[in-house]
Amino acid sequence: MHLCETRAQLRNNNRYDHMTTFYLGSSAIALYFIAFVYQITKVRQNRPLRRDFLLGLASIAILVHFFTSFRLVVTEQGFDFSLWQASSLILTVVNLLIWVSSLRKPAHNLFLFLFPLTIPVIIASLNSDSMIVTYKDMNLETGLHVLSSILAYSLLTIAALQAMLLAYQNWQLRHKHLKGWVRALPPLQTMEVLLFEVLWAGFALLTVSLISGFWLFEDLFAQHLGHKTVFSLAAWVVYAVLLWGRHQQGWRGNTAIRWTLAGFIATALAYWGSKFVYEVLLTSPQ
C-alpha cells in the first residue's frame, strides 16, 4: 500500500514538473514573440524603437528561457544534453550574450534573427521524447569541458550570424539599397570589430573545450566521438587561420565572412550534425 502511494506521488510530481516546464517554456515563447513583433514593426515603419523597452522585455524572456532550459537539462536521472535540450540551452546563452553586448553596442538588431530561431527550438525541446543522459555525476573537469563547449558553440553561432548580416549589409551598400531594417544595423566597421571580438572569445573557448576533451576521454576518435572530433579540429584550424590572417594580413570584408562561415559549418557539423546522426538517424526504427 505504501509502495503504491509512493509511486503515485512520484507520478504526480513528474506530471507537476512537466507542466511547470511547459508553462515556463510557453511564457518564454510568448515573450520572445512579443519582442520580435515589436521590433519588426518599428523597423518596417522606419520608426525608432524604445531600446530600454526592448532590452527589458528581452531580459525577462531570456530569464524565463534559462529556467526552462535548466529544467530540461538538469533532470533527476542526470544531465540531459540531447539535441533539442542542448540547442535550447545554447540559444539561451546566445541571446544572453547578445543582450549583454547590446548594453554597450548597437547589437540588439541581431534579435531580429535570433528570436524567430529560438521559438521553434523551445517548442521542439518541450515536445522531445528523447532522453539521452550524458552525465550523472559531473565533476569539475567534466563541468569545465561542457561549459566551455556550450559557450564556444554559442559565441561561434553569434559570429556566424554577424558574418551573414555583414555580408548582406555590404551587398546592400554596394547596390545602394539603404532602406528598411538595413538602416537599423550598426555601421560596417562596428559590425566587423564586434565580429572579431566574438571570434577571439569563441576560438579561445573552443581551444579549452578541445584540450579538456582530450584530457577527459581516452579515445576522442572512437566511433561515437570520431566525427565530432574531426569536425571540431577542422573548425579550430579554420578559425586559427582566419585570426592569423586578420592579425598578420589585415583580412576583412568578404574574406573574413567566408572564413567565418566555413568555420561555423565545420562547428555545426561537429555538434548538431553528430547529434542528429547519433540521436535521430541511428536511433530511429528501421
Image (tube, helix red, strand yellow):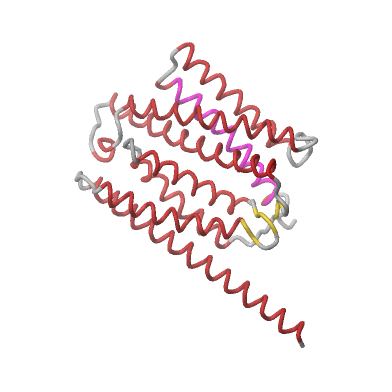
- Residue 8 sits above or below residue 245 on the image: below
Position of 1 compared to 38: left or right? right
Say if the magenta span includes residue 270. yes
- Residue 216 sits above or below residue 73 on the image: above
> Which of the 4 quarters of the picture holds residue 64?
bottom left
Main SS, magenta region, reads: helix
Between residue 182 and residue 206, name the one nearer to us. 206
Position of 45 compared to 14: left or right? left
Residue drawn 55% across the image and 61% down it: 126
Q: Residue furthest front?
A: 140
Residue drawn 79% across the image and 35% down it: 219
- Residue 63 sits above or below residue 193 on the image: below
Residue drawn 66% across the image and 42% down it: 274
Position of 11 compared to 42: left or right? right
Between residue 197 and residue 138, name the one nearer to us. 138
Residue 108 locus on image (x, y percent): 34, 42
- Residue 187 sits above or below residue 51 on the image: above
Quadrant housing the C terminus: bottom right
- Give the extent of the magenta segment: 255-279
Residue drawn 66% across the image and 59% down it: 130
Residue 12 locus on image (x, y percent): 62, 78
Quadrant housing the N terminus: bottom right
> Which of the 4 quarters of the picture holds residue 263?
top right
* Label total for image: 0
Q: Residue furthest bottom?
A: 1
